[in-house]
Image (cartoon, rainbow, N blue to C red):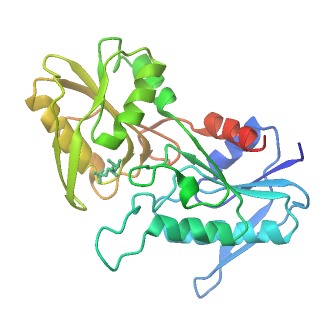
Amino acid sequence: MSEIVIVSGSSNTPLAYMIAKRLNVQPAKVEIRKFPDGEKYIRIDSDVNGKDVFIVQSMHFKPDEYIIEALLLASAARDSGAKSVTLVAPYFAYARQDERFKPGEPISVATIAGLLNTSGINGLITVDVHRHRILDFSSVFKGKWIDVTVMPELAKYATAQGLVNGKTAIVGPDGEAIQWAKLAAESVNVKEYGALQKKRYGDEEVKVSGSLDLKGKNVFIVDDIISTGTTIVEASKLITEGGGRLTGVACAHGLFVNDALFKLYSEGITEVISSDTVPNQTTRVSSAEALSKGILSILK
Ligand code: R5P
């Protein structure tokens, strides 16, 4: 195996450094700044020639800026002779724009994946990436793709906090979230898991329905992303109306845009946990271990 180089973009340097520490390598020296006109300047000031380069860049809050940074870092690594260039994107933006919902729209996730390819990125590692209409990223990204999960870590943390036990039902708020509920449930020996159904009418307008029998049960919700919090609020209402008791909520990526957390707390949803793919005040578990394992396995 050739040498690994970890190059951190500016979106989540603590996570990049944690990964480097786990892999026992020094993070590369990188200069990232803006020109007076707002354009990005980047420079990798470490030797990457002949090495396997991993660019760690989450894409939350300022997705377009962070994507450009990752593309520039990748092409710099490629042009400096890197043996391989892998983008480690703990939170991968644009994944929810995976269909032409109306005529005239692009399939944005395919456009972004294509940009990664043209910038010399030949590997991609994501964490619990949103997969709804595009189930396999390999259909849009030409290279090796690995998706790792933080669902077991979230479930173990929730169990240690007493939010989940053997009798809890772990529920995803929509059909796609059944995969997260399954991963979480199996990691802590919870037998009962399932998913509700969701129909989206607008950015902050969804209807959640479902026929799970949750009467008299303790229920814990898991999802990949919490953005505006609308999905969780509606799922929580349905669970409560059906006689269930919501003990808490976990997500891999806590974007919590605008007043999302306030919305959740106002609904009485106070136990909210997330991972460090998007660092925020509910972050309780790290994706560093899962990502480090992903890095080692993509090299095989
Ligand atoms: C989409 O289906 C995702 O899995 C999440 O459920 C969604 O992104 C949550 O968004 P929001 O918090 O705005 O309802």
The residue positioned 25% from the left and 42% from the top of the image is 232
The residue positioned 86% from the left and 69% from the top of the image is 80
Q: Position of residue 250 (x, y in %)?
A: 37, 35
Q: Position of residue 24 (x, y in %)?
A: 81, 38
Looking at this view, name the residue that lies furthest to the top. 166
Q: Position of residue 158 (x, y in %)?
A: 40, 24
- Between 8 and 37, which is closer to the camera in this rendering? 8
Q: In the displayed structure, would residue 42 be above or below residue 256?
A: below
Looking at this view, name the residue that lies furthest to the bottom. 37
The residue positioned 78% from the left and 71% from the top of the image is 76
Q: In the displayed structure, would residue 60 be above or below residue 158?
A: below
The N terminus lies in quadrant? top right
Q: Residue 21: which quarter of the image?
A: top right
Q: Residue 203: which quarter of the image?
A: bottom left
Can the viewer see residue 62?
A: no
Q: In the displayed structure, would residue 94 be above or below residue 158?
A: below
- Between 56 and 84, which is closer to the camera in this rendering? 84
> In screen coordinates, is 101 left or right of 47?
left
Can the viewer see residue 296?
A: yes
The image shows a total of numbered marks equal to 0
The residue positioned 27% from the left and 49% from the top of the image is 229
- Between 130 and 54, which is closer to the camera in this rendering? 130
